[in-house]
C-alpha cells in the first residue's frame, strides 16, 4: 500500500505533487480508497474543518446555445428533450435567491446558456442582483459564457461576487469536446473577470473520454488560475448529446479524482458538482472528506438532491453547514 500520508504532508506544506504521485492517486487500488480519503481529509480539515458550503443554481436561460460542447444538453448539436426558454424575468431570479437562502445556501449562481451575454441580459441580471442584495446577504455567482472586462465590471458594480467559468478539461483535450471556442478563450474570460475585481469559480468535468494525463493537466492549469472555488463535475450522460454513451466513471474513480484535486488545491473550496448523484450514488457522503462544498436542489437540466436530504447527509457525517464564511450552523 502506498504512503498516502506523505501526499497530505506535501499538500500541507504547499508542495506540488510529482506527476508520478498524481498518477499513483488516480491509479490507487480500490482497497486503498479509505486510506486515500483519510489522507485527503487531513488536508481538507486543516483549512475547512468539518464545515460544508452549500450552493444553489438557477438556470435563468435554457437551450438555444450556439456552442457545440459535446457534454451539454443545451448545445447547438444536442437533440436532448430539455425545457428551452429565454432569460427569466427579474422576479423569478429574485425568487430563486430566496429559495437558495431557505436552502441554507451560502451562494446563489445565476446561469444562462449561450456563447456570451447580450447587453440587455447583463442589464436584467444586474437589476435582479441589486434587488437580491437589498434583501439577503447571500453571495451571488454568475455563469454567463465568454465575457469581456467591461461586462464583468458591470456585474461587479451591481453586486455580483463571483464569476464561474470552467476550464472543463485539459488544453490538449479541449478541441475533442468543443470546437466553437478555445481553451484560451476561457482563460481570457477568467482574466477579464479577475481584472474587474470579481472572485473566480473555475473547475472542470471528468468522464468525457479524457486520460489521466488530461485530468492532471486540468488540475495543474487550475493551480495557475488560482480560483477561489473549484466545481468538479462528473459527466452525467444525456441522451441526444455526443457523449450520451460515455460511461467511464465509477464511484471509486470519482473519489480518487476528488482526492487528487484536494492534494493539488489544499486551500481552495472544492465543490462536488453536476453528476454527483449519477456517478457517486451511495458513496456520495464520502466525497465530503476531500470536498468541502456541494450543490443542492438540482443542476441546469438534470435533477439533484433536495436541500433537506443534503442537510441530513451532512448531519449524519457529523459535519455542519457554513451559511457564510464566519457562521457554521446546525443542520
Image: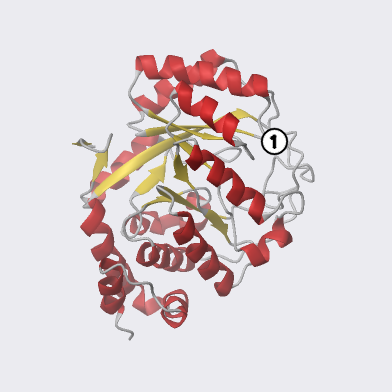
Apparent side of residue 11 relative to residue 214 in the rendered image (left or right): left
Q: Name the element at disc 1.
A: loop
In the image, what residue occupies the spot 59% across and 15% down?
89
Q: Residue at x 51, y 57 (%)?
A: 279
Q: Residues within 10 Å of mark 1 (few under 14, many from 20)?
A: many
Q: What residue is drawn where x is 21% and y is 58%? A: 46
Q: Is residue 108 above or below residue 126?
A: below
Residue 95 seen in render = no
From the top left corner, tell me how far across and down residue 123 is, in percent.
59, 18
Quarter in which the C terminus is drawn: top left
Residue at the spot 60% in from the left edge and 35% down from the top edge: 144
The picture places residue 148, in percent across and down from the top left corner, at: 62, 36
Task: Give the vertical position of 152 relative to 45 (above or below).
Answer: above
Comparing 281 with 26, the one in front is 26
Q: Nearer the viewer, residue 261 or 289?
A: 261
Q: Which residue is mark 1?
A: 114
Quarter of image, res 105? top left
Q: Quadrant of the N terminus?
A: bottom left
Q: Quadrant of residue 296?
A: top left
Viewer can see residue 113:
yes
- Relative to 135, say whether 192 is above or below: below
Amino acid at each position: 500500500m502506498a504512503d498516502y500520508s506523505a501526499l497530505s504532508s506535501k499538500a500541507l506544506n504547499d508542495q506540488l505533487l510529482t506527476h508520478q504521485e498524481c498518477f499513483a492517486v488516480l491509479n490507487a487500488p480500490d482497497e486503498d480508497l479509505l486510506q486515500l480519503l483519510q489522507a485527503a481529509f487531513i488536508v481538507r480539515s486543516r483549512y475547512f474543518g468539518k464545515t460544508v458550503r452549500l450552493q444553489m443554481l438557477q438556470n435563468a436561460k435554457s437551450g438555444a446555445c450556439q456552442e457545440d460542447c459535446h457534454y451539454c444538453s443545451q448545445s447547438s448539436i444536442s437533440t436532448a428533450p430539455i425545457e428551452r426558454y429565454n432569460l427569466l424575468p427579474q422576479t423569478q431570479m429574485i425568487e430563486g435567491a430566496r429559495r437558495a437562502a431557505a436552502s441554507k445556501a451560502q451562494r446563489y449562481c445565476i446561469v444562462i446558456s449561450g456563447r456570451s451575454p447580450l447587453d440587455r441580459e447583463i442589464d436584467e441580471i444586474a437589476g435582479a442582483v441589486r434587488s437580491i442584495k437589498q434583501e439577503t446577504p447571500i453571495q451571488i455567482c454568475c455563469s454567463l459564457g465568454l465575457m469581456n472586462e467591461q461586462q464583468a465590471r458591470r456585474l461587479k458594480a451591481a453586486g455580483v461576487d463571483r464569476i464561474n467559468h470552467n476550464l472543463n478539461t485539459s488544453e490538449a483535450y479541449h478541441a475533442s469536446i468543443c470546437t466553437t471556442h478555445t481553451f484560451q478563450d476561457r482563460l481570457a474570460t477568467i482574466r477579464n473577470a479577475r481584472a474587474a475585481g470579481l472572485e473566480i469559480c473555475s473547475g472542470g468535468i471528468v468522464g468525457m473520454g479524457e486520460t489521466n494525463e488530461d485530468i492532471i493537466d486540468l488540475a495543474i492549469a487550475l493551480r495557475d488560475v488560482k480560483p477561489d472555488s473549484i466545481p468538479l463535475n462528473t459527466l452525467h450522460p444525456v441522451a441526444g448529446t455526443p457523449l450520451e454513451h460515455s460511461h467511464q466513471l465509477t464511484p471509486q474513480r470519482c473519489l480518487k479524482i476528488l482526492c487528487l484535486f484536494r492534494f493539488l488545491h489544499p486551500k481552495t473550496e472544492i465543490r462536488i458538482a453536476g453528476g454527483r448523484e449519477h456517478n457517486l450514488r451511495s458513496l456520495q457522503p464520502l466525497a465530503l472528506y476531500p470536498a468541502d462544498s456541494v450543490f443542492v436542489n438540482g443542476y441546469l437540466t438534470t435533477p439533484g438532491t433536495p436541500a433537506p436530504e443534503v442537510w441530513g447527509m451532512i448531519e449524519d457525517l457529523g459535519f455542519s453547514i457554513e451559511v457564510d464564511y464566519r457562521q457554521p450552523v446546525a443542520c
